[in-house]
Amino acid sequence: MKTIKGLSRKEFEQKFGTNEKCLAFLVEKKWGNGFLCKECGHTLYLKGKKQLNRRCKKCGREESPTAHTVFHKVKFDLYKAFGMIYEILTSKKGANSVWLSERFEVSQNTSWLFRRKLQSYLESSGNHPLTQTVHIDEFEIGTPKKGQQGRSKSDEKVRIVIAAEIRNGKAGNAYARVIDDFSSNSLKEIFDKHISFEAEIKADGWRGYSSLKRLYKRLTQEKSENGTNFPEIHIQIRNFKNWLRGVHSYCEVQNMQDYINEYFYRFNRRNNRQTIMDKIFDRILIKKAPGYKDLTNFAT
């Protein structure tokens, strides 16, 4: 499986190749700027029962480096968990749970659960809206049936809207969201979360965009002409569909946004590859991962 340039597998293994190295990294990331007890807010600590654990000097609450992270109670080596994160975030085509289970010699259920937990950290923060020239389009995923072509309503198809910043004829950052339908109210979700009011926005002739011109003064529409007027965004749609089919084969409707988040998390950081591992830990260490019960209603 080809990996992107920036953080080679050799560099990764040198940095995270053992459980001890992974734990030392977690300690530095978690407490490098000082200890803070999650129970009482005290900042002084004593050594815990295990060497790297820390016990609050005030309330006695003990915490391990993996507590409240995606690594909490993992049943396999920590360096394998780090390796899964590396493969998911840096492999050019991603990594599904079957391949991960073979690569790291864990059960497919184990790799699936860990992978799904990691996806919970990949949602966009919404803090970096698209500000320049933005192309927006909508598409569907699902097998078309007779009488259901185009934007027709069907529970068997997933409707998605995508927005991409175009810089010098190439795509910059991009975001996509699952929507209920192609109405103005549904399309507005991606505008609210990911597009600046100052952006110059270009959409096709679909009537759902018309009412949004009152809010987004620089929104214009023109016919798509089978995608010829929006070539870059159609490339992104095609690439996402190929990735989803090629890596995961199948994805249930309720999972789709998580897979979208994963794809565009990696895509939007393609020019910051050297620090992609460090950046994900900034999220992992401040948000608790979902539990098994939270994920068992999902698949693949």
Image: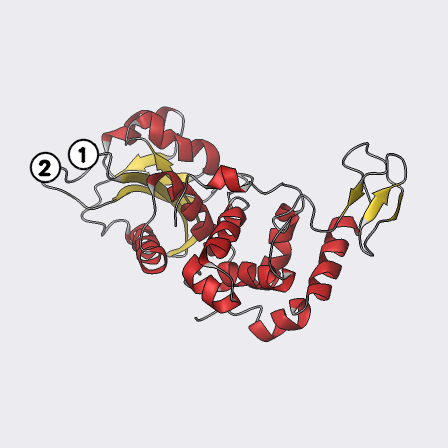
Using the image, determine if residue 43 lies above or below residue 49. above
Using the image as rendered, state which of residue 82 and residue 141 is in the foreground: 82
Report the disc number at residue 143: none
Q: Secondary structure at mark 1?
A: loop
Q: Left or right: where does residue 169 sit relative to residue 182?
A: right
Query: Residue at horizontal 56%, vertical 68%?
Result: 6
Residue under numbered circle 1: 152
Tell me where residue 118 appears, x and y as whole percent. Answer: 53, 50
Q: Residue at x 32, y 31 (%)?
A: 180
Q: Residues within 10 Å of mark 2 (few under 14, many from 20)?
A: few
Q: Quadrant of the N terminus?
A: bottom left
Disc 1 vs disc 2: Cβ atoms closer than 8 Å? yes
- Viewer-nearest residue: 72 or 237: 72
The answer to whether residue 268 is seen in the rendering is: no
Report how far apart the C-alphas of labels 1 and 2 lie in the structure. 8 Å
Image vertical order of residue 213 relative to residue 14, above or below: above
Q: Indicate whether 31 appears above or below 270.
A: above
Residue 201 in the figure: left or right of residue 26: left
